Amino acid sequence: MAAMPVAMSSTERLRATYLGQPVDHLVRTEFSVWMEAVRRWRSEGLRLSWRDILGLDHEPSEEELARHEEMSPQASPALRQLLHFDEPAIHHVRVPLGGCEPPLFPEYERKVVERQGDYEIIQDQAGRLLKVFLGRRHGFMPDYLKHAVSSRRDWEEDVLPRLDITTPERWASFADAMDAASRARAQGMLIRQSVIGGYMYLRSLIGPEDLLYKFHDDPELILDMMDQWLVVADATIAKVQGQIAIDEIYLDEDICYNHGLLISPAMFERFLLPYYQQLVTNARARQAGHVYFQVDTDGYAVPAIPLYLKAGMDVMNPFEVAAGNDVVQIGQAYPELVIIGGIDKRVLAAGKEAIRGFLTYVLPPMVKRGRYIPECDHGVPSDVSWENYTYYRELAAELDH
């Protein structure tokens, strides 16, 4: 890279990273930290109140804490300073387009359906029946017993009405969201609108196994469901862009597992790609500034990269190392791709020697390459000690420029 520039603001640094321009140091962020990890850290030397850790204006109750499964260290000025993080550079527009579940209005009632010893059957907001540990909702994979769409009748009578873009409740928070986005823009922040990915949307409504059968047995149902996905996503993003220019569309997808794609490339190109291309094309046509397209998928993502590049992808995360992703190799193969993640959570738990060995492998070539933001390959788990995590943050700050 070129000679190191003078000190940059967090937004200048992020914009330069996306453009492949020189930076004073790599962007310093973290995707999230599990609350179980933070509780552990407080017992091991993190001497901050919950108010300071969460960046709140009050000390939260235990009930309030229980509603947090993960937290962002960037939200806390105290943690930012302690762990060498940048100030937040991206504002997330809070206009609901889903995440891991589709943006249903109204959502299904969340309720306990049945108790079975140490387990309970619950209905979640996406209409799924899940078997979970009694009183626990986080830190494990539930058993999915039933999904909302098993037939065209389920789709047309029960789910499709919940995806009506004219439902007033869908827009109840829109004005407040635009006010917040305008304030963030005035501070120079990038503006991001998230949307549930088409695969995640279909999987959450149909189920991962049944979805594969539906691709073959009832493709017209899948196409009808994706038509409505595009209607909701495109209309919402258009409404946002009518008020403020956005910098990024963030696609929550999770379409990979540890050997690659969960569906075939042919399925992707028939059932997902045209919709992504249309959404991105429409968003980019509405404004002068470039709209970046970021894709978030767990698992071994390398086979997915060329498919998403066809859709206009600029940025991808988190590149789980346990699944076989090596960001140094991927960075060489795709020099224009902005890469976020690739820091092995297992290494962070293994100790200082392992952390130093891993960071000295990844950071020097990725600093030279650019277009890289190191983060733990998704939420920092509870097996990472406070001593190991602070060592990681200190060493990363030494090696990232």
Image (cartoon, rainbow, N blue to C red):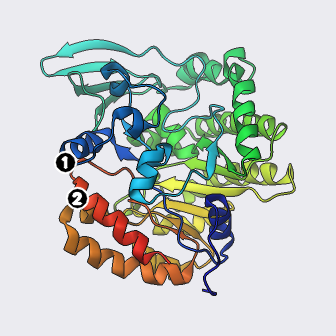
Mark 1 or mark 2, which is nearer the start of the sequence? 1
Left or right position of 197 against 211: right
Could you classify mark 1 by the number of other residues whose Cα lies within 10 Å: few (under 14), some (14-19), or many (20 or more)? few
The answer to whether residue 293 is above or below residue 137 is: below
Residue pictured at 48% horizontal, 38% vertical: 100
Left or right position of 25 against 117: right
In front of the other: 78 or 244: 78
In front of the other: 231 or 400: 400
Residue pictured at 64% horizontal, 62% vertical: 9
Type of residue at label 1?
Glu
Residue pictured at 32% horizontal, 39% vertical: 35
Quarter of the image for residue 109 reads top left
Residue 81 coordinates in the image, percent (x, y): 44, 54
Report if residue 384 is visible in the image: no
Asked if the residue under mark 1 is in contact with the one under mark 2, i.e. CB atoms within 8 Å, the reply is yes
Alpha carbons under labels 2 and 1: distance apart: 8 Å
Picture disc at residue 387: 2
Could you classify mark 2 by the number of other residues whose Cα lies within 10 Å: few (under 14), some (14-19), or many (20 or more)? some
Q: Which residue is mark 1?
A: 44
Left or right position of 358 against 303: left
The answer to whether residue 110 is above or below residue 84 is: above
Q: Secondary structure at mark 2?
A: helix
Residue 204 coordinates in the image, percent (x, y): 47, 35
Quarter of the image for residue 118 reads top left
Residue pictured at 74% horizontal, 31% vertical: 179
